[in-house]
Every structure is written in C-alpha cells, then in structure tokens.
Amino acid sequence: MNDVSASLYEVAAAHGAGWVAMHMRGTPATMQQQASYDDVVAEVRAFLVDRAEKAIANYIKALQLSQHASVDDVPADKRGDLDKPITPAGEEHKKPEKSEKAE
C-alpha cells in the first residue's frame, strides 16, 4: 500500500498488506505553502520513525489477534484456498525436472 498520508498503517496491518509511508504536510493543494523546515532531514525522519513505530505496533496487535483464529473460524463456503496445502515460496514457478529415460 503506497500511503501518501502515512496514516493507513492500521488498515495495512489489519489486512497484512505491505505499507510504504510517505511524508506530506497538509494536502496536495496546500503542501507547497507548508514546506518550511528548520532541519528537513531530522523533521521528516522523526515523522516517518513515529509512523513506522505505530505501524509496527499495529502489525503486532493484528498478529496477536490472528493467532486466536483458525481455518475453522471461517465458514466452509468462504474458505476458498485456505484448505489447500501451502506451496513454499518460489515452488509454484519451478519447472518440473525432466526425468531421464530408463535404459
């Protein structure tokens, strides 16, 4: 999720989505008038660190909540692929190895 407001960390955490925080003062219409900083690097860094800490806390909270759930909590007609075995990352793109012909 590309979050120009850096405020959607709760939504990203609740859905297990990747989250990229951006910095902007005000709105797109007003941000140019609010672009004055004493130390731009320190101030933007402090803002993004604060948002990252909030995002981490919300992600941990979402994980804690999800650990209490199981596939059985999802109605059978809504499970879709949940009952299928998990394929290790990258395995779905491997080509099957050619078997050598028996001599």
Image: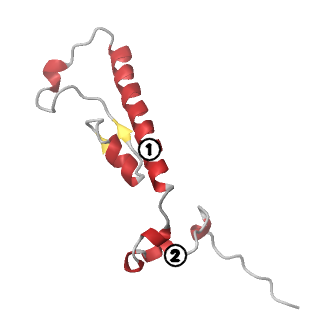
Tell me the amino acid under the disc marked 2: Asp
Q: Nearer the viewer, residue 25 or 95?
A: 25
Q: Position of residue 42 (x, y in %)?
A: 38, 15
- Seen at 33% across and 17% down, the residue is 43
Q: Which residue is mark 2?
A: 83
- Seen at 59% across and 68% down, the residue is 87
60 lies above or below 48:
below
Disc number for residue 25: none
Q: Earlier in the sequence, mark 1 or mark 2?
A: 1
Q: Quadrant of residue 45?
A: top left
Residue placed furthest toward the right:
103
Element type where label 1 sits in the image: helix
Question: Crowding at label 2, few (<14), some or many (≥20) Cα neighbours within 10 Å?
Answer: few
Its colouring scheme is: secondary structure
Question: Crowding at label 1, few (<14), some or many (≥20) Cα neighbours within 10 Å?
Answer: some
Tell me the amino acid under the disc marked 1: Lys
Q: Nearer the viewer, residue 3 or 98?
A: 3
Q: Quadrant of the C terminus?
A: bottom right
Q: Position of residue 64 (x, y in %)?
A: 48, 48
Q: Nearer the viewer, residue 74 or 50?
A: 74
21 lies above or below 33:
below
Q: Quadrant of residue 35?
A: top left
Q: Position of residue 49 (x, y in %)?
A: 41, 26
98 lies above or below 3:
below
Q: Which residue is mark 1?
A: 61
C-alpha gap between disc 1 and disc 2: 25 Å
| Circle 1 or circle 2, nearest the eye | 1
Left or right of residue 60: residue 41:
left
Left or right of residue 38: residue 69:
right
